Image (cartoon, helix red, strand yellow):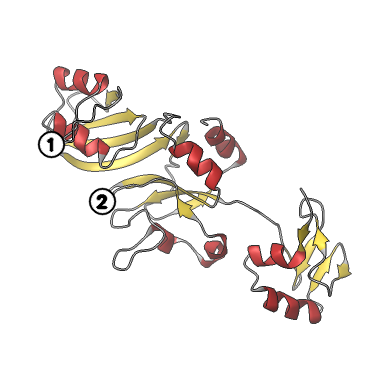
């Protein structure tokens, strides 16, 4: 990793403004590789230099990747004047990273949503050219017939005339009104509109997977955690 100004690195990690960091340096609170540092403009190498502030080690991370089980009632946005956003579920420790949701889930839809500040990865996952699969648990008002299932799997025409790409549908259990639907697009309200095109109403919708990344079943609605290195590599392999 190339050299990075000490004050910029610490500001990125949420330790205050550059003015705040200068105050910490003057107070002798910043130590790099065992030496007290007064000049916060000096460059360091975060991958090999040890930085301690106020007695606490600081580990630099340029990008953050969170998996969240989005609850109903929250919108997938960074801010809104009247509605709750998924960012309001995050603790203060992530506030400095300027995270944003990757793609959107409807306000009443639950399940897997990714939050990151890595614009490049987000773009790759959302690009229509990539056809990254997304799997949903869908509860509908009545069982899917064989003809309806075939139509969904071959691609249906939505209310605006758009023809969807083929989908994959799996009934959760025999004679169940719950199905797993996997699509490779992300049109507005696509899952609900696809089922509407075959005469079905969606009663409950939850996203379970993006690519090969599945929602951690231990996360209750509103909970989140950072991705493991293995999960991150799995996402990157979808590009």
Is 118 placed left or right of 179 in the picture?
right
User: Relative to residue 239, is residue 47 drawn left or right?
Assistant: right
Q: Position of residue 169 (x, y in %)?
A: 28, 24
Residue 77 position within the rendered picture, expressed as x and y whole percent measured from the top left: 38, 56
Q: Position of residue 61 (x, y in %)?
A: 66, 54
The foreground one among 162 and 86 is: 162
Which one is in front in this view, the residue at disc 1 or the one at disc 2?
2
Neighbor class of circle 1 (other Cα within 10 Å; few <14, some 14-19, many 20+) is: few
Residue 86's disc is none
The residue carrying mark 2 is: 108
Residue 20 versus residue 29: which sits nearer the camera? 20
Residues under labels 1 and 2: Cα distance?
16 Å
> Residue 162 sits in which quadrant?
top left
Residue at 35 percent across and 40 percent down: it is 207
- In the image, 228: left or right of 37? left
Front-lying residue, 121 or 211: 121
Among numbered discs 1 and 2, the one appearing first in the sequence: 2
Observer-nearest of 65 and 79: 79
Residue 175 falls in image quadrant:
top left
Picture residue at 64% right of the left edge, 53% below the top: 62
Q: Secondary structure at mark 1?
A: loop
Name the residue tied to disc 1.
141
Q: Is residue 131 above or below residue 204?
A: above
Q: Residues within 10 Å of mark 2 (few under 14, many from 20)?
A: some
On screen, residue 54 above or below 86: below
- Say which element carries label 2: loop
Looking at the image, the residue that sits furthest to the right is 35
């Amino acid at each position: 990793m190339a050299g990075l100004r000490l004050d910029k690195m610490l500001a990125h990690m949420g330790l205050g403004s550059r003015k705040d960091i200068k105050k910490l340096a003057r107070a002798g609170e910043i130590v790099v590789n065992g030496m007290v540092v007064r000049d916060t403009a000096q460059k360091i190498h975060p991958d090999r230099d040890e930085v301690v502030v106020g007695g606490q080690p600081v580990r630099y991370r340029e990008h953050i990747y969170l998996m969240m089980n989005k609850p109903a009632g929250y919108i997938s946005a960074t801010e809104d004047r009247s509605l709750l956003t998924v960012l309001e579920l995050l603790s203060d420790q992530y506030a400095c990273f300027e995270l944003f949701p990757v793609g959107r889930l409807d306000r009443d839809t639950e399940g897997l949503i990714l939050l990151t500040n890595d614009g490049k990865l987000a773009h790759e996952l959302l690009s229509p050219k990539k056809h990254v699969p997304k799997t949903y648990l869908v509860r509908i008002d009545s069982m899917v017939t064989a003809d309806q299932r075939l139509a969904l799997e071959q691609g249906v025409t939505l209310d605006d005339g758009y023809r969807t790409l083929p989908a994959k549908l799996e009934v959760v259990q025999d004679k169940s009104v719950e199905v797993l639907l996997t699509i490779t697009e992300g049109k507005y309200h696509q899952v609900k509109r696809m089922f509407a095109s075959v005469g079905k109403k969606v009663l409950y919708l939850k996203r379970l997977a993006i690519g090969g990344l599945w929602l951690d079943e231990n996360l209750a609605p509103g909970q989140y955690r950072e991705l493991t290195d293995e999960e991150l590599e799995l996402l990157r392999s979808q590009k």
